[in-house]
Image (tube, grey):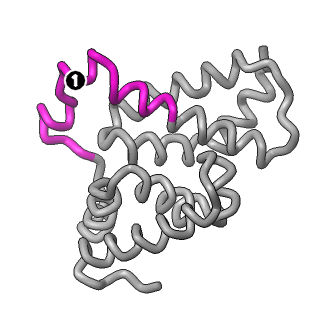
Amino acid sequence: MRSEQEVNKAIELYSDMILRLCTVYLKNSTDAEDIFQTVFLKYVLHSKPFESPEHEKAWLIRVTINACKDHLKSFFYSRTISMEELTGYAPEITQEQYAVMEAVWSLPRQYRDVIYLHFYEGYTAPEIAGILHRNPNTVYTHLHKGKELLKEALGGALNG
């Protein structure tokens, strides 16, 4: 089990990234916060040391993605609706931010993962390949195709 000091440091370093990743996957903040807690509980209980900060970050990303996938497959998830759907409440974001996030959410999962990790977290294709256990050339292909799909979805407003 990890010390309180280690956990606090990890939360300080990675909380924004984990919450963004959860939100991209789950498309609502309530479920994202639940998975966020699950991820850090798994972190607390994970007793093996990490080789480096990059290894720790990659481990957290992988655990987050897996927890989101498990949540989406769960019986509970398939039988409920979110509070945002029920109340119409969503956090304040600009129209442009919403359009981009909606376009990212609409991508097929293999493109959404690499687009998120590349543009939001700043990983290179070889690093993404290691995190997602994919061939680097596959990641390059998914990045290229994902950018094309985003350009289409946003009406060509995306540069690069």
79 relative to 96 in the view: left or right: left
Residue toward you, 36 or 160: 160
Q: Is residue 74 above or below residue 101?
A: above
Q: Residue 106 occupies which quadrant of the picture? A: bottom left
> Callout 1: few (<14), some (14-19), or many (20+) C-alpha neighbours within 10 Å?
few
Q: Quadrant of the N terminus?
A: top right
Chief secondary structure of the magenta span? Answer: helix
Q: Quadrant of residue 53?
A: top right
- On the image, numbered disc 1 is attached to which residue? 78
Magenta run includes residue 132: no
Q: Residue placed at 28% from the left, 63% from the top?
A: 103
**SS for tag 1?**
helix
State the image coordinates of residue 19 (x, y, percent, origin top left): 49, 41
Q: Is residue 83 magenta?
A: yes
> Residue at 69% across / 58% down in the picture?
127
Residue 78 position, x and y percent, is: 22, 23
Q: Which one is in front, 38 or 95? A: 38
Residue, x 23% and y 81% (percent of image)?
Answer: 155
Q: Residue at x 71, y 36 (%)?
A: 10
Q: Which residues are magenta?
A: 66-90
